[in-house]
Amino acid sequence: MGIKSTLISAVLATLAAIECVQARAIEDASLARRAGPTVYLAGDSTMARTSAPHNGWGEYLSKYVTIPVVNKAISGRSARSFTNEGRFTEIERLVVSGDLVVIEFGHNDGGSPNSASDNGRSNCPGTGPEVCKSGKTGETVYTYNYYLEKAARSFIAKGANVIISSQTPNNQWEGGSYNGAASRYVAYAAQAAKNVGRGASYVDHFQSVSNMYRKLGAQKTNSLYPKDHTHTSPEGSDLSAQAFVQAVSRDLNGPTPLKQYLKPNLPVVW
């Protein structure tokens, strides 16, 4: 065999080895992917990775579950803007059967889209098929429930399980006295989960954090809000994550598929 033939054979052998390694890596990744589900998070800054002096609770969820957490929450988003920016669609492309998606919005969803100063986040008032027109862009604007339910059904169609979670409360001890009044989006989130039905469950994160704040009292709760009355410190966000998993572990609003993936000996915060 000549030198040229030997070189060709060596190159072919190397390429075959590379292909074998790549195929094995793909197979290993596929097997690892099937070994357990992933939790995807969709929400606003109270859930998202942000910068000091505050952070979102989604960054701490992985401390309390046994499966991977992928935080897709983005600061400043509402159900409407998250939809319009294609962020629900991005998660839909990623999920596979058995995955879980936690959806939590409400802090940026208020206001009216009808004015010329429409901020691109306000939803159409109501919880059903109501529609509005943006006073700024002329786009058709739907309700909070429409956006959540549409996204939830798209994930469920791919075999994923959806947990619709109510928003976290603002500082309920601001000013020194307790105020547990809930945003209307707390009830809207519960209604969205009910409307979606099979494949969807509900966690009242607002209520679980409220329970915790009542227990912590004014001084401690106020210390968790270093910047404003909405965004908590890393400690506060970690506590919000703990309140969320406690709600899941105790079936606060009925069973959710996340319960089986909770770590043992979880902290008790309320």
Image (tube, helix red, strand yellow):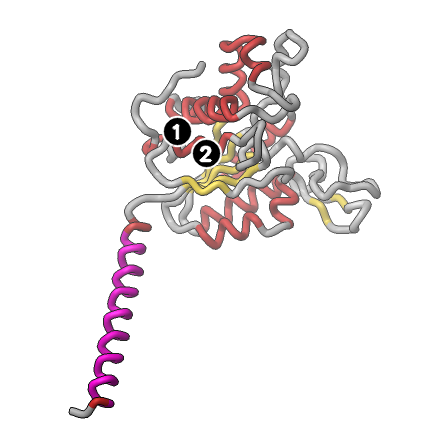
Outermost left residue:
1
x%, y% of residue 258?
A: 38, 34
* Tag 2 residue: 201
> Start and end of the magenta stretch?
4-31
- Residue identified by numbered label 1: 255
**Farthest residue toward the bottom?**
2
Mark 1 secondary-structure assignment: loop
Asked whether the residues under the numbered discs 1 and 2 touch, taking CB atoms below 8 Å apart as contact, a structural biologist would say: yes
From the viewer's perspective, is 76 left or right of 71? right
Quadrant for residue 242, please give it. top left
Say if residue 192 shows up in the picture.
no
Location of residue 176 in the rendering, given as x and y in whole percent from the top left corner: 64, 7
Is 182 placed left or right of 134 in the picture? left
| Residue at 71% over, 35% down | 125
- As displayed, is residue 223 above or below residue 10? above
Mark 1 to mark 2 CA distance (whole Å): 7 Å
Q: Residue furthest front?
A: 3
Q: Residues within 10 Å of mark 2 (few under 14, many from 20)?
A: many
